[in-house]
Image (cartoon, grey):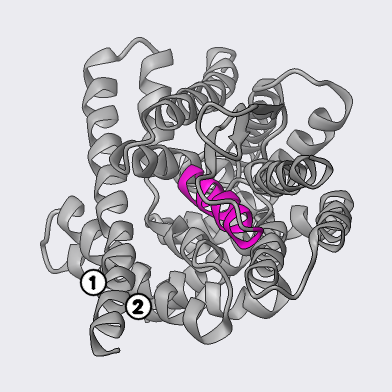
Amino acid sequence: MEKKVSIEKVCILAGKIMLESGAETHRVEDTMNRIASAFDVVNPQSYATPTGINFAVDIADETYFLRITTRSTDLHKIAKVNHISRRITAKELNLSEAFSSLNAVDKEPLLYPSWVRVIFAAFASGCFAIMFGGVWNDFIPAFVAGGLGYAGMLGVDRFLEIRFLSEFLGSVIIGIVTVIVIYFGIGKEMDKIIIGGVMPLVPGLLITNAVRDLISGHLIAGLSKGAEAIITAFAIGAGIAVVFAFI
Amino acid sequence: MDIFAQLVTSFIASAAFGILFNTPKRALIQCGLVGMIGWIVYYVLVAQGLHVVPATILAAMLVALLSYFCSKIYRMPIIIFNVSGIIPLVPGGSAYNAMRHFVINDYYTAVQLSTKVMLLSGGIAIGLMFSEVISQVVRKIAAAKR
């Protein structure tokens, strides 16, 4: 009995890390089932949605549940959990080793510090302004707007735990910066600068993942991810609109 | 010259998004290359007069194929490569434009743009499913040979 509980703990912890890091639902369920099978569970039952995980070692057996509250994109952790699950399948790790290494992955900080991410968000914004047909004059304004907007989003995220407000304020900052640079004649095309600037905030990944989940039959996961994506996009659009309302 | 600028910017943008998504360091260059190749295919196809939706599907298929090979070569989950690689194709600009038209009460344009966003993300999903098709076919062929 003691051992059985541990299997569930390992599976749920692996699933939790993967879901919080933004893995697709079917990948999470697949990984949990693989880990369980490696520990000789014949008929594992796992059910993952973006907000919670259910897991049982057999049908109509005791079911365990875990609530997921935060979601971000952290591919580094997904790769780590994938590696651990491969080692479990290859029988290189026993239950307690697997549990402690998963715990270590769960506690790991983000791979890149905030200032590095802000700088690269700025570069991405500048490049997107060019890719969407802007001229080179728009590179620096989009660079500045995108960097400040992303930094603002990270900062608000740290102080206030209200979802979607950080994206809203981030895009307000982008709008203000864009209006200022256009006013001083540094940038040329307002639309391109704003689109470049908001690209790091836009939930492009969520939109795509939502459609993929829907197509692969994970209907609840797809709908809830789609709702999150739409509200985020709406927050960004509203932030820009607030700025437009005042000029 | 124009193509060259697109190559450089799409490479930097994809790799930079890799950093925003906390991609492991040894995968960043590959992410940038996957994103660059996908975007250039899309860009050339659209410049040749193809409609954006089929162009997105074809480019996403290529991204899926490249990500599949990268994941096999570097032994990492495929999501690491296709997430950053697909970012240039994602209709973030159209999604933002749609929302902007909604909030300024231009519903007519907004609904049009939202439909475009839905079609484009559907196209990306179809393209990305291609990698699952390949991996299943490869697995079945390998199983049949045994």
Q: Is residue A187 above or below residue B134?
A: above
Q: Which mark is residue B3?
A: 2
Residue for point 63% across, 74% down? B28
Please identify the quadrant where the N terminus of chain A is shown: top right
Residue for point 20% across, 60% down? B55
Residue on which the image places disc 1? B44
Residue for point 57% across, 57% down? A37
Estimate the spatial distance between the alpha carbons at disc 2 and disc 1, rounded to whole Å. Answer: 9 Å
Between residues A6 and B110, which one lies in front from this camera angle?
A6
Q: Label 2, secondary structure: give it.
A: helix
- The residue stretch that appears in magenta: A24-39
Residue for point 77% across, 35% down? A152
Determine contact: label 2, label 1, CB under 8 Å. Answer: yes
Q: Is residue A52 above or below residue A137?
A: above
Q: Can residue A234 be seen in this view?
A: yes
Host chain of mark 2:
B
Host chain of mark 1:
B
Is A43 in the magenta? no
Q: Where is residue B71 in the image (x, y as percent from the top left)?
A: 50, 76
Q: In which quarter of the image is residue B66?
A: bottom left
Mark 2 or mark 1, earlier in chain: 2
